[in-house]
Image (spheres, rainbow, N blue to C red):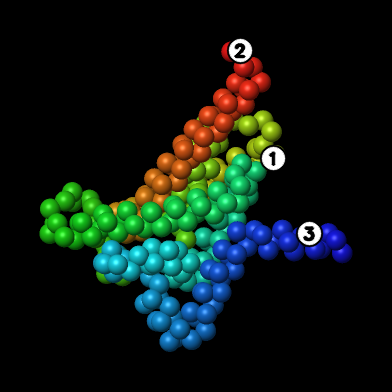
Amino acid sequence: MNQVIRLMKRIALSPLFWIITICSSIFFLENSDLSNYFLISDFATNFPSLSLSGQYYRLLTSLFLHTGITHLVSNMFLLIILTWVVSPIISKALYLSLLLLSGVLGNLLADVLIVSLVNSDGNYWSFLTTFGYSHGIVGLSTSITGLYIFALIIFVFKTSKDLPQKKFRLSALIFVSFIGILSLILNFIWGQWFTITAYVHFFGELVGGMLAFIFLYRQHKKLGLKTHDINPLK
């Protein structure tokens, strides 16, 4: 009985559980009625022109919407894998902050870019497009790409022998990398190389990477202080 209670508390305190619950609930609520779909999507989708016109909440709300069951399941699947990979390394608060900052700031930077492209009247590099500007963007993948780059950088620069099941976690990270590379190849084949989807993913990764280096710097600084306390004469 005590084990069941501890398990329930653990689940209730898990950011991953609540993120999956919120995304799934919104998805099923949207698809339960057509009017719900239009109401939620119109209110919460990240339309760059609206988001940058004062409706900044869309940068956050759009993260929890998904276009279909495949979109939802694939994002939740990758989120579960990456959460397992980084869970021994970072706290729940840092994990949640990482997802929110990567998602919101990634969306914001992508919106700024695509609005700038629209306003430039075609005076930009030909490989850049404004595809997706009018349709908007939804999905947690902006946050997930930030989490992925964070995990990748941590594994490259922080070699921890104490990390449990390190080989399995590294294998999981390689698997996610393979999916990411495959997705890039397919987008290139389909002619969707530089679209709003690509922009939010890129900037989500950029924010996640910056947060990873900040985390590593703080860890290095903290380790230096501990070493100094142990050896004050050095």
Q: Which of marks 1 and 3 is nearer the N terminus?
A: 3
Q: Determine which residue is flagged by label 2.
A: 233
Q: Earlier in the sequence, mark 2 or mark 3?
A: 3
Q: Is residue 138 left or right of residue 150?
A: left
Q: Which quadrant would the N terminus be assigned to in this image?
A: bottom right
Q: Determine which residue is flagged by label 3.
A: 6
Q: Which quadrant would the C terminus be assigned to in this image?
A: top right
> Badge 2: how crowded within 10 Å, few (<14), some, or many (20+)?
few
* Vertical placement of residue 93 versus 168, above or below: below
* Vertical placement of residue 81 versus 152, above or below: below
The x, y position of residue 213, in whole percent, is: 46, 36
Q: Is mark 1 on a helix, strand or loop?
A: loop
Figure quadrant of residue 10: bottom right
* Closer to viewer: mark 1 or mark 3: 3
Q: Is residue 17 visible?
A: yes
The x, y position of residue 31, in whole percent, is: 50, 80
Which residue is depicted at the point 38% across and 70% down?
A: 45
The x, y position of residue 67, in whole percent, is: 44, 70
Which residue is depicted at the point 16% across and 60% down?
A: 119
Q: Is residue 181 visible?
A: no
Q: Determine which residue is flagged by label 1.
A: 165
Q: Indicate the amino acid at tag 3.
A: Arg
